[in-house]
Every structure is written in C-alpha cells, then in structure tokens.
Image (cartoon, helix red, strand yellow):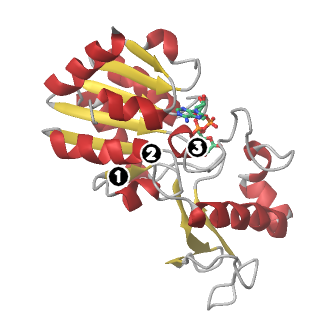
C-alpha cells in the first residue's frame, strides 16, 4: 500500500523537505489557480500577476489582490496545514517550501517556512521600495499609497520576475539534501518551483506526491497519493 510505504519513508527520513502549492489551501476555501473552480472571473493568473498588467491597469490588479486578501482573511488553516506543523515537530530536520502567498502555514504554526513567491499581506512601494505589512481588508484607498506618495504593489513575485534569491537558495539546498521530498497540492507547471521535486529525486530522495489529481510530477513520484491534502496528510502521519 503506497501510503504505508510513504509513511515509512517519512518516519525514517533524517531530513524532510515539503513543497506546497495552492491545493493545500483549497480546503480552506481559497480557490486554486488552474484547477476546476479555478480563480477569479475569466482572468488567468498569467494575465494579472505580471509587472506589465500592473503598469497598464493597477486598479484591476489591485481589485484581484484585494478580493483574494478578503478571501484569505476569512480562511482558516485546514487539517493539511496542521499535519505539516506536526510533521515539522517530529522530523529531525525539516524545511517547508511554499509557493502560496496566503500565510496559512505560518498561521497554522509552521516555523521554518520558505516563501518562494512572497506574501500577499506585504505591500511594496514602486517608488521608494519601502515594504510594509497591511492586513486592511478591503484596502482603502485602493490602490494603496506609500507615505512617500508612491503607488504600492503587492509584495508577491509576478511572472517574469525572479524569486527572492535567499529563498530560492534555501529551497534548492533543502531539495538537494533531504531524504524524503513531499510535494503537496501543486500542478508543478510554474518554474523554478516546479523543478524542485526533480532536483530532490536526482539527489536520491524519495518523492511523495499528495494531490487531488494527476500532475506532470506524478509519473516521477515514488508514491503518488491521490486525494485531498486535508485527508491524506493526517493519514500520512497516522494522526487520529
Ligand atoms: N488537495 C490536494 N491537491 C489539490 C486540492 C486538494 N484539496 N485541490 C486542488 N489540488 C491540486 C490540483 O489538482 C492542482 O494540481 O492543487 C494543484 C493546484 O495547482 P495550481 O492551481 O496550478 O496552483 P500552484 O501549483 O500552486 O501554482 C503555482 O502559479 O499562478 C502562479 O504564483 C502562482 O504560486 C502559484 C503558482
């Protein structure tokens, strides 16, 4: 039974790395980007989450992010997030790498979180680059303004932008040096995050995938566990 084998690999691992995507927050009520019931109106993230989209229509881009901030503000971490907190406590060494910007891993209690794509609660001035946290929902004014008067943007990584270098280096190091690589709720289509599982595999780790559906990673996984993260992850830890 693959979940039994996967449980064993996690139990015997000296170091575990986890990569999460939007799927782990789906059961908290936050729509994924590409799955069924995907995101906002008819727009694709690739159309809105770009510097060009923001430059041409900051009001529309902020409408999208304000809507998402409103959803996330009402969301609670789910059993999948909580299972990863438990896994971090049990593992001798543990790295949680996330593509999500919703902050739910930290709210659940995860300590070592590597945020590859930034944080939706951070605003950054496009003029003086000052960054600040704002949990204001809805934003007022929208678009938000810095004290210097400059237009503020969401503190997230957009398509065409590079990842924070410290976060990427930490993620790559974790993938290269783990014994088990657990990849949860990501379609793995966005690079470079989507390539971490292959880095781990090539370095000899066991790759365990938890996903509601098939992904391009599934054939490479040593165990592809099909189902919602909120159910599978607690089972993987044999939590009651
Ligand atoms: N449990 C587990 N997996 C789930 C669940 C669930 N309850 N619901 C959906 N999924 C899976 C889907 O099958 C899909 O494979 O989660 C994945 C979500 O994929 P995407 O929507 O593409 O999200 P993600 O992989 O995180 O996107 C990566 O793209 O738009 C950018 O920056 C954005 O970080 C994001 C990146």
Quadrant in the picture for residue 142: bottom right
Q: Position of residue 131 (x, y in %)?
A: 52, 76
Task: Please tell me whether mark 2 sits on a helix, a strand or a loop.
Answer: strand
Q: Tell which circle, 3 or 2, labels the residue nearer the N-terminal end.
A: 3
Q: Closer to us: mark 1 or mark 3?
A: 3
Which residue is depicted at the point 51% across and 18% down?
217
Q: Residues within 10 Å of mark 2 (few under 14, many from 20)?
A: many
Ligand 1 is found in the corner quadrant, namely top right
Which residue is located at x 25 percent, y 45 percent? 86
Q: Is mark 3 within 8 Å of ligand 1?
A: yes
Determine which residue is flagged by label 3: 26
- Decide: is 227 above or below 47: above
Could you say whether the residue bearing mark 1 is in a helix, strand or loop? Answer: strand
Residue under pointer 1: 113
Q: Which residue is mark 2?
A: 98
Q: Position of residue 14 (x, y in %)?
A: 14, 30
Query: Disc 2 to disc 1, how far (Cα)?
Result: 7 Å
Residues at discs 2 and 1 in contact (Cβ within 8 Å): yes
User: Left of 204 or right of it: where is 208?
Assistant: right
Q: Is residue 202 visible?
A: yes
Residue 170 can be seen, yes or no: no
Residue name at image x 58 percent, y 73 percent? 124
Q: Residues within 10 Å of mark 1 (few under 14, many from 20)?
A: some
């Amino acid at each position: 039974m693959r979940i039994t084998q996967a449980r064993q690999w996690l139990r015997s691992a000296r170091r575990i790395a986890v990569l999460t995507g939007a799927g782990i927050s789906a059961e908290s009520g936050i729509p994924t980007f590409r799955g069924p019931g995907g995101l906002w109106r008819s727009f694709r993230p690739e159309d809105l989450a770009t510097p060009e989209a923001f430059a041409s229509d900051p009001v529309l881009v902020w409408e999208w992010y304000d809507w998402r901030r409103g959803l996330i503000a009402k969301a609670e971490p789910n059993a999948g997030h909580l299972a990863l907190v438990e896994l971090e406590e049990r593992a001798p060494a543990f790295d949680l790498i996330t593509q999500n910007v919703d902050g739910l891993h930290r709210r659940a209690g995860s300590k070592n979180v590597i945020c590859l794509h930034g944080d939706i609660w951070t605003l950054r001035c496009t003029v003086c680059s000052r960054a600040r946290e704002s949990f204001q929902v809805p934003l007022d004014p929208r678009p938000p303004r810095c004290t210097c008067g400059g237009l503020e943007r969401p503190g997230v990584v957009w398509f065409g932008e590079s990842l924070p270098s410290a976060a990427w280096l930490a993620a790559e190091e974790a993938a290269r040096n783990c014994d088990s690589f657990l990849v949860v709720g990501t379609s793995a289509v966005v690079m470079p995050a989507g390539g971490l599982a292959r880095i781990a595999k090539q370095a000899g780790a066991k790759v365990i995938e938890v996903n509601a559906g098939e992904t391009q990673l599934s054939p490479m996984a040593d165990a592809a566990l099909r189902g919602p993260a909120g159910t599978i992850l607690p089972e993987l830890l044999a939590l009651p």
